[in-house]
Image (spheres, rainbow, N blue to C red):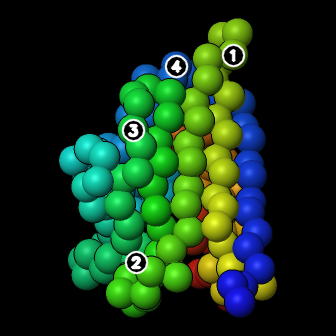
């Protein structure tokens, strides 16, 4: 019997262009500025990607494969903790839909195929809102927010 699955959807509006939003997701040097991590891949369907901590250790925290890519409007990747990469059941899926909307962009991030009640499901419910708020801040003001601020204070 398969485990119950859940999903998380986050929608934000960003004063930017679809090209700049897509670039911010896929270019390591930009992702580092709002996420504290770099998303590293050649972004071709079937290629691997790694979510690498932007510090001295360069720890790979999340891994997956590029499932679909259609710049600048859509990117779909699989997603698993690096420590669970060998277990096919540990993978979930993240879809980034980037749509022009008047003078801005509507970014919809859907993280689905998550095991209900899992640590990953709980973690992304806290993680995506701050990461995507930081992305919005970076693109609109030139400066991201400290996505690790709460962890530092704890």
Task: Describe residue 154's horizontal placement relative to residue 4 as left or right.
Answer: left
Residue 69 picture quarter: top left
Outermost top residue: 102
Sooner in the amino-acid sequence: mark 4 or mark 2: 4
For the C terminus, the image quarter is bottom right
Does the rendering let one see residue 40? Answer: no
Does the rendering let one see residue 8? Answer: yes
Image height check: is 98 above or below 60?
Answer: above
Q: Which residue is mark 2?
A: 61
Q: Residue at x 56, y 48 (%)?
A: 95
Image height check: is 74 above or below 117?
Answer: above
Q: Which residue is mark 3?
A: 69
Determine whether the residue tagged by mark 4 lies in a helix, strand or loop: loop
Q: Which residue is mark 4?
A: 17
Sooner in the amino-acid sequence: mark 1 or mark 3: 3
Circle 3 residues within 10 Å: few <14, some 14–19, many ≥20: some
Task: Describe residue 41's horizontal placement relative to residue 150 as left or right.
Answer: left
| Residue 148: % across, % down | 57, 71
Q: CA distance from mark 1 to mark 4?
A: 9 Å
Determine whether the residue tagged by mark 2 lies in a helix, strand or loop: strand
Q: Which residue is mark 1?
A: 101
């Amino acid at each position: 019997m398969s485990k119950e699955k859940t999903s998380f959807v986050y929608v934000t509006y960003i004063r930017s262009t679809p090209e700049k939003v897509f670039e911010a997701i896929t270019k390591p040097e930009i992702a580092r500025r709002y996420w504290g991590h770099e998303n590293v891949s050649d972004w071709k369907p079937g290629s691997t990607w790694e979510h690498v901590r932007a510090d001295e250790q360069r720890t790979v925290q999340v891994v997956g494969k590029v499932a679909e890519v259609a710049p600048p409007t859509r990117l779909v990747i699989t997603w698993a903790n690096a420590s669970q990469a060998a277990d096919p059941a540990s993978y979930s899926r993240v879809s980034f839909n980037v749509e022009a909307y008047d003078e801005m962009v509507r970014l919809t991030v859907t993280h689905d195929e998550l095991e209900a009640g899992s640590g990953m499901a709980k973690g992304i419910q806290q993680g995506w809102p701050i990461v995507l708020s930081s992305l919005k801040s970076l693109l609109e003001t030139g400066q991201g927010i400290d996505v690790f601020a709460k962890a530092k204070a704890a």
